[in-house]
Amino acid sequence: MSNMEKYKSLFKGFYEAAEKYGARDALYVDGMTYVYEELAERSLCWAESIHKANENPYVLTLGYQSYSNYVSMLAALGAGKAYVPLNPNFPKQRLLKTMEIVEAGTLIVAAEGEASLDQLLKEYQGTLVILLCDSDSKAGWEGRYPQHRWLKAGECKYSGAMRQAAPEDPAYVLFTSGSTGEPKGIEISNRNIYNYLRFILAEYPIYTEDRISQIFDPTFDVSVYDMFTGWWSGAAVYSLPRAQRLQLSSFVRDHELTCWCSVPSLANAVRQIRLLEGGGLKTLRQSVFTGEALSMNTARTWKKAAPHSTIINLYGPTEVTIQFAHFQCDDLDKEYPHSMMPIGFVFPSQSGKVMKEDAREAEIGQAGELYVSGSQVSKGYLKNREQTKSSFVKIPESDNLWYRTGDLVEMDEEGCLYYLGRIDDQVQINGYRVELQEIEAVLRRAAKTATAVVIPWPPERKNNPDSVYGFVLSGGKLDKKKINALCKEELPEFTRPADIFPIETVPINASGKLDRKALSKQLSELLS
Amino acid sequence: MTRGECREIIVRCIKEIVGNDDLPSQIEDDYNLIKAGVVDSLKFVKLVLLIEDKCGIKLELEKLSNEEFGTVRGFIMLLAKGIE
């Protein structure tokens, strides 16, 4: 690192803000507000016990959207360790698999996680130190599971010590579904996240007066953006309850939020039931969209509701620490390719390359896979050397390791990147290579809609289908004749949808992204 | 349309979107679909669109308080209001 003297761990950045702004609001959750001093003291108190518990660097945090869950993550970091979030709403087998891969030494459980804890411990083979955040008594637990060591939050003692993790120490481990069905653990170091925050806060500063939304689940790395851009800056982080997501307008208004961050799908859902009416989000000064492609239609609708807000599109996979490319769209009337907002420019601290299949760099305007290298790139997948080797690679004329994003992009003369789709979503029909995203872009234009999805048929040959079908987001009836005519103008015959169906909503999966599988199932029902 | 008829339509739509398995046998007026976890954002949007489609009206969801949002009572109120 070039600026070693400036390095701080993820926790240290929070701690420094807490020292400076102790009496300011740090967190709003469950109808209560907590100031920095309280949040820092509580987490350091738990951190002390966690630090003493064992040498193991990983701490599981079981909970969801509660004060105790936020403190759990901070406490793990305050102990100089990494947190590994477990969402009690996830399927039990998925949680167990995560626990088995991580082999953590400690588990912190908030009240809402206790029901799952019982189920998990019945099957989990490892030995843990378990900290109960909200339980008055641990006797029952000790009796049932004596192989683990049990602690109560009330027993933790604050010593005032602040432990700073070293740059290469892990800060968090998040899991993503692997193509084989085995989840992949991505380990992000304090150095990775320090480099990310240093850039993002310089480019899009957060101020002590700001009130920031916190919507993303801790198992999704954008939650780290929500929490720590706020906590490094002395701002207040507002946890939007899951049940209140569709009422985001009243939440923003009631709490006078100034900064927003969500997936575009949420904005779309709210727009469909007309809860995103003009001007309702007046207090917002900055809106960040991330996690999936942002259509210009969505951006424009949002801007109408939030007239004083900038619109920022951030792009990146978990492996490269939250995001590594950004685009601030100031001219929303401008037409961009495929009616999608560009994913923009690679952070100047990182390097991106568009690579063709022959491992040579693509020319300007040529499609290729986006590779990225730099201080934000993770070292790889936890205890999964094979996957690491195939995704983190060497390329000619470079000594660095490059992460293959699997995303198909093109770059313009100015270095601005445009997202085209997944490289593994490519299909071949009659031997012709077809990008589903290309068909979708045409459908969107033809049907004048924000979302169009193309599903290959039959589903068991999705990479080598006979035809494709289109789903178009639409409130009423489709003018199929007109859409087909427009498709005919832009698409070669074999890429034209065999039929087009209107859908009223776009199915979304657990990680908040478009659920192609659900649409594929729907298609099977329609065609049966 | 009487309040009872409005209620009947709402309950039928809820059953269509959620399915009987996840619902209590007796659906009370203050039953909150979102808090009960039987609908996510997506299903909620579907439900709203289904009711609007069946009754040919637009539900003014912004008129509901936080307590009413997502409840059977809230839907009945909006539907009765929309039909007036």
Image: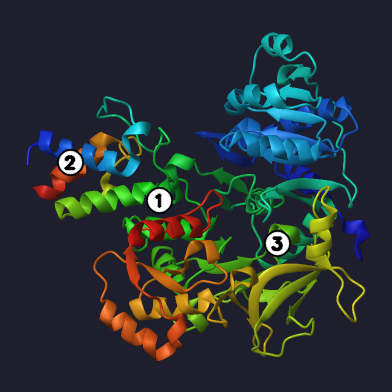
Residue A256 got which mark?
none
Asked whether, in this view, residue A459 is left or right of residue A184, the answer is: left
Local SS, label 1: helix
Q: Nearer the viewer, residue A284 or A381?
A: A381
Marks 3 and 1 on same chain: no
The structure residue drawn at horizontal position 11% and vertical position 37%, both measured from the top left corner, is B5
Asked whether, in this view, residue A213 is left or right of residue B14, the answer is: right
Q: Is residue A105 visible?
A: yes
Asked whether, in this view, residue A65 is left or right of residue A171, the answer is: left
Q: Chain of mark 2?
A: B
Q: Nearer the viewer, residue B29 or A47?
A: B29
Q: Which residue is mark 1?
A: B42
Task: Report x, y in % for residue A157.
Answer: 80, 21
Q: Chain of mark 3?
A: A
Q: CA distance from mark 1 to mark 2?
A: 20 Å
Q: Is residue B44 above or below residue A525?
A: above
Q: CA distance from mark 3 to mark 2?
A: 51 Å
Front: mark 3 or 2: 2
Name which residue type carries label 2.
Ile
Name which residue type carries label 1.
Leu
Q: Quadrant of residue A357?
A: bottom right
Task: Report x, y in % for residue A407.
Answer: 65, 71
Q: Which residue is mark 3?
A: A201
Q: Which residue is mark 2?
A: B9
Crowding at dot 2, Cα within 10 Å, few <14 / some 14-19 / many 20+, comes out as some
Q: Is residue A35 visible?
A: no
Q: CA distance from mark 3 to mark 1?
A: 33 Å
Q: Is residue A526 above or below residue A412?
A: above
